[in-house]
Image (cartoon, rainbow, N blue to C red):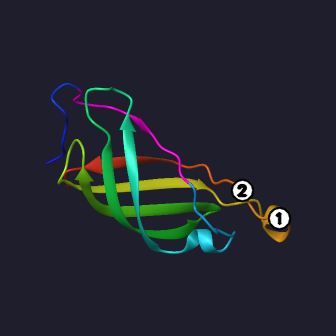
């Protein structure tokens, strides 16, 4: 069952983050982490997502799949999955100073 908030049955979110000590090759590493989703609609409280992450290259893109649990805020303690896809870093930048950003688009499903 997918989860919704009574005051906001559908919604969007924005997020950004920093991968400390990331390189053009380590951006593909698996790992764990925590993200906070701040909802566009103010009715739901921010949701903390604790997850395990896997990454892969697919046709010139990087696909990041994160699976875990909403551990705090609205929708806790629901299971959740997030998938983001972005262009892989510029190869020429990787040969010099490195890539400073990775922009991705994706979706979050809560309540699997």
Find residue 26 and report its horizontal and vertical position in percent: 62, 74
Give the number of callouts: 2
Q: In this rendering, would 88 be left or right of 39?
A: right
Mark 1 = which residue? 97
Find residue 64 and report its horizontal and vertical position in percent: 48, 62
Q: Residue at x 61, y 49 (%)?
A: 103
Residue 96 falls in image quadrant: bottom right
Q: Which residues are magenta?
A: 8-17
Mark 1: secondary structure? loop
The quarter of the image holding the C terminus is bottom left
Compare residues 98 and 108 and report the one nearer the observer.
98
Mark 2: secondary structure? loop
Magenta span: predominant SS is loop
Query: Within the magenta stretch, is there residue 40?
Result: no
Q: Contact (CB < 8 A) between labels 1 and 2? A: yes
Q: Residue at x 64, y 68 (%)?
A: 22
Compare residues 83 and 30 and report the one nearer the observer.
30
In the rendered structure, find residue 100 and report the number of the disc placed on it.
2
Find residue 55 and report its horizontal and vertical position in percent: 50, 69
């Amino acid at each position: 069952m997918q989860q919704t908030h009574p005051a906001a049955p559908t919604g969007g979110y924005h997020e950004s983050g920093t991968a400390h000590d990331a390189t053009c090759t380590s951006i593909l590493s698996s790992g764990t982490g925590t993200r906070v989703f701040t909802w566009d609609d103010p009715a739901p409280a921010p949701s903390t997502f604790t997850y395990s992450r896997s990454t892969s290259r697919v046709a010139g893109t990087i696909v990041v799949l994160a699976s875990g649990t909403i551990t705090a805020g609205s929708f806790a303690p629901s299971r959740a999955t997030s998938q983001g896809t972005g262009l892989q870093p510029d190869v020429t930048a990787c040969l010099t100073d490195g890539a400073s950003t990775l922009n991705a688009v994706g979706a979050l499903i809560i309540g699997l």
